[in-house]
Image (cartoon, grey):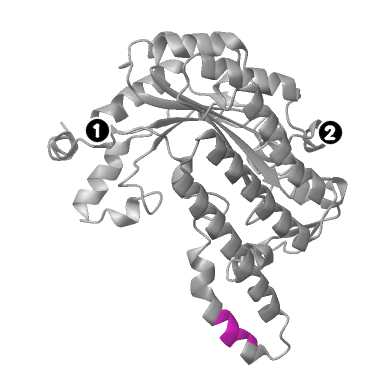
Amino acid sequence: EEIDFDYTVMFDMALRYLDVKSLMPFSDWLRYPITTIPVVRGCNYNCSGCGGSATAFKDFAHRQKPAFRSPRRLVAEISEIGKYINAPVFILGDINQNGREYVEEFFGQAAGLPSGIQIFFEFFQPPENWFFDRAHSIFKNVLYEISPDTHDSSIREAMGKPRFSNQQLMECIKYALGKGAVRFDLYFMTGLPGQDKQSVLDTVDFCQDIYQHLNWDPRFMPFISPMAPFMDPGSRAFAQPHKFGYSLTRTTLAQHVEAITQPSWKYILNYRSQAISNDDLVQSTYQAALGLNLLKGRAGSISSHVMEENERRIEKAMEVMGQIDAAMGMEDEEAREVCLDKLKQASDSYSMSTVCEKKELEFPLFNRGFNWFRIISKVLFKK
């Protein structure tokens, strides 16, 4: 509760050292200045590959249970950020973890915020309908996201994720959109415990079922990506890889640092799954991404131009991956390095937005920017 996430410190540092670039959380932040409000230290859940799970916090931070910041403090920070940055606010961590009374207190405090604020919530499991009723009564521009990781409930159970059915998930999305949500994002992952190639590909059919259930509502946006670059050190799966069907290929800090220099994400991974080869993991991830891209294009979730560009980029990435594989198989080390150097530019150009256009992940609103007068005044006249 005593921790203060004060963005004005960043403004002060930028002006004091005339250096904005090194303070930006990611390269395009000035164009898309999304902000975050952390809700909690710790977690109630124990997802196998997560370095922020309950077990990881217990083992490395001796935390026995999550500590939640007060709703009053959360709302105060949202209000303070809005004075200086007109941008989406991401509520970081599932606010529902602390029970309905806590969430109701948050909504009660948030009723005093401008209704047009751009805000989005993440969930670890589908919330009950009352959550969307309350959010709709307070916020005009609200987005939701949830990461089921897979459509296969048996894999979710093996991972230790919260238990919920696919029907619950679909009904949750439908209700939220019916309550005026600007968008509902769904995140899937490849390389999960026991997940084979067919299971990855079946993600596309599952998302098609959701689109059909929603009458092809374009506000639904599914995404898929590999568990990359690493399985989290500190996670249960990293500590006990064989229990979850993995073998680790890198365990030390030096090995992980060296891995980042590899020519593609296939060679960066610090694990191998017993359920799928790395070759099949790569191919099925790209194939599933192509399938989701077509679904989003059909629904109008993305434009036909973006859909076509995504398809071109994914296919090119698959082609470059094949060339990298061929180069990595060269016995002549010097010739291999020469070939990889030639491929580096092509590999880098397709690494930023491969399985989807990066801008698809952004909050689909405008009115983004900085109140420079207030920022400068705050820094110059702190007292």
Placement of 274 over or under 145, stated as above or below: below
The image quadrant where one finds the C terminus is top left
Based on the picture, tell me whether residue 264 belongs to the magenta stretch: no
Placement of 260 over or under 89, stated as above or below: below
Q: How far across and how far down the image is residue 381, in percent?
A: 12, 35
Res 53 quadrant in image: top right
Q: Helix, strand, or loop for circle 1?
A: helix
Q: How many marks?
A: 2
> Overall secondary structure of the magenta stretch?
helix
Amino acid at dot 2: Ser
Q: Helix, strand, or loop for circle 2?
A: helix
Residue shown at the point (37%, 32%) measured from the top left? 88
* Distance CA(mark 2)–CA(mark 1): 46 Å
Residue holding disc 2: 154
Residue shown at the point (60%, 23%) measured from the top left? 215
Res 258 quadrant in image: bottom right
Q: How far across and how far down the image is residue 16, in percent?
A: 20, 51
Residue holding disc 1: 84
- Label pair 2/1, CB-CB below 8 angstroms: no
Residue shown at the point (64%, 75%) measured from the top left? 323
- Which segment is the magenta one? 336-341
